[in-house]
Structure formats: C-alpha cells, structure tokens
Image (cartoon, helix red, strand yellow):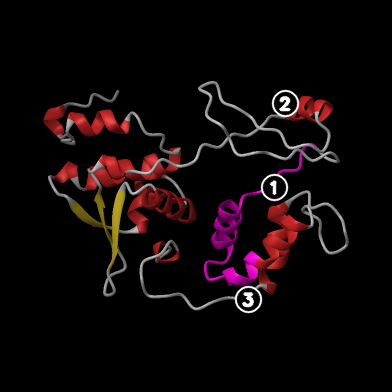
Amino acid sequence: MPNPQVENGFVRIATEIMEQLALIRIPGEAQQVLNVILRKTYGFNKTHDDISLSQFVKATGMKKPAVARAIKKLIDMNMIHVIKKDNKTTSNYSFNKHYKSWKPLSKKITLSKKITSVIKKDNRGVSKKIHTIDTITIDTITIDTDDENISTPEWEEFKDYAISKVPNVNQQQMKLKYDAWVIDGWKDGKGKKIKNWKSKVNHNITYWGTQHLKSDMSYLDLLEG
C-alpha cells in the first residue's frame, strides 16, 4: 500500500503559487503535463529543465499528439516557457511563476442530446446563447435543424485535429476549405450535410498538400522523436 512521506522527496512550491493555481481552470491533459514540469524543475530545486516528449509520455501515460496539444495549451495560457534547442531532441521547459501574466482559456461546454432537443423545439434554426450557472456567457451555438447529433468545430479545434494527423499540412489550403464549409453551412460539394467533420478532414487532408516547417519554436516542433 502506498505510503508517501516528505522525507522521501517533495516539490517545493510557494503557497501563493498554489493558491493561484487553484483559481485558474487548466484542462486535464494540460494539468498532467504541468505537474510533470513542476516535478522535473521545482522537484529538483531547478527553475528549468530539458524534458523530452518521451519523458512526458512515460510520466503521464498520454500519447505524443495529446502531450503536444497539452504543451501548446500551457504555452497559450502563458504558464510555461519552452525553448527549442537546435542541437538537441529535447526542449527546455520552465514554469512561469508570474501568475498575473497567465491567460485563462475560453470556457467551452458540450450540450447533451436531451438539451439540444429542447432547444430545437423552442428555436428551430435559431442560434441560442447558453449561460453557465455563474453567468459566464458562452459563444453562440447554432443547433442544426436536420440532425441534432451534428457538431461543428471552431477553427482551433479543426486545425489541431488536422495537425495531429498530418503535422506539416498546408494550413492556408486547410483554412480555405474550413471557411468554405462554414459559409456553406457545413455542407459538402454535393450539398450534403457534413455529419462527421473529422471523417471529412481525413478524406480531404491529402488534397491540401504540405508545407515546409520553420525552424523556430511551434506546436509542430513538439512532435520530436
């Protein structure tokens, strides 16, 4: 039976930091990756450390694309700093303790089949704003009147999914196709409703081509080895 003791090691983190971490919403996978970074840095009395993607995979049990997406979220939230080294397969990570510069992610919700059905009956073809209990306004969600199970992605979700399939996909061509589908009300070239956008991406992604990756730090750089 596990019996952890501080005598066997502990991570030294200021109480003020712990209080601020409790106030910010961090997605589950991003939280796992952040815990690894804190363990590898503060856990060894260091402010930064070289960590390979395979180390994150081993420590979290997550797959590489999921780890890379989680790292990107933490970068977007300005909670970590990452330096890509040209002569190494690992990147250097550090935790940003200046919490006033952290940027919370926008809040998202997923509507159940029952809720979308009620909204459809009251507002056919009309966009409806949903409010959380704490009155935070969520982006307007349009409910499809033909099939309540159809979901459409925001650009960032669409892009992240495509990149997880083909890291160097031509994003300019991909954005043109995304915009075309949005304008057409998520219908394909034959006028049929796109019921599974991920399947549609998998089918079209080879036609979008690829692009040369830049040498500076980016989300794609995280998919090393």
Q: How crowded is mark 3: few (under 14 residues within 10 Å), some or many (20 or more)?
A: some
Could you say whether the residue bearing mark 3 is in a helix, strand or loop? loop
First of labels 3, 1 by sequence position: 1
Q: Name the residue under label 1.
A: 152
| Lateral position of residue 148 relative to residue 88, left or right | right
- Amino acid type at mark 3: Gly
With respect to residue 206, does 186 lie above or below? Answer: above
First of labels 1, 2 by sequence position: 2
What's the magenta region? 148-175
Between 21 and 166, the residue placed more toward the observer is 21
Circles 3 and 1 in contact, beta carbons < 8 Å: no
The alpha-carbon separation of the residues under discs 3 and 1 comes to: 23 Å
With respect to residue 212, does 47 lie above or below? Answer: above
- Amino acid type at mark 2: Ile
Could you say whether the residue bearing mark 2 is in a helix, strand or loop? helix
Which label belongs to residue 209?
3
| Lateral position of residue 41 relative to residue 28, left or right | left
Q: Residues within 10 Å of mark 1 (few under 14, many from 20)?
A: many
Could you say whether the residue bearing mark 1 is in a helix, strand or loop? loop
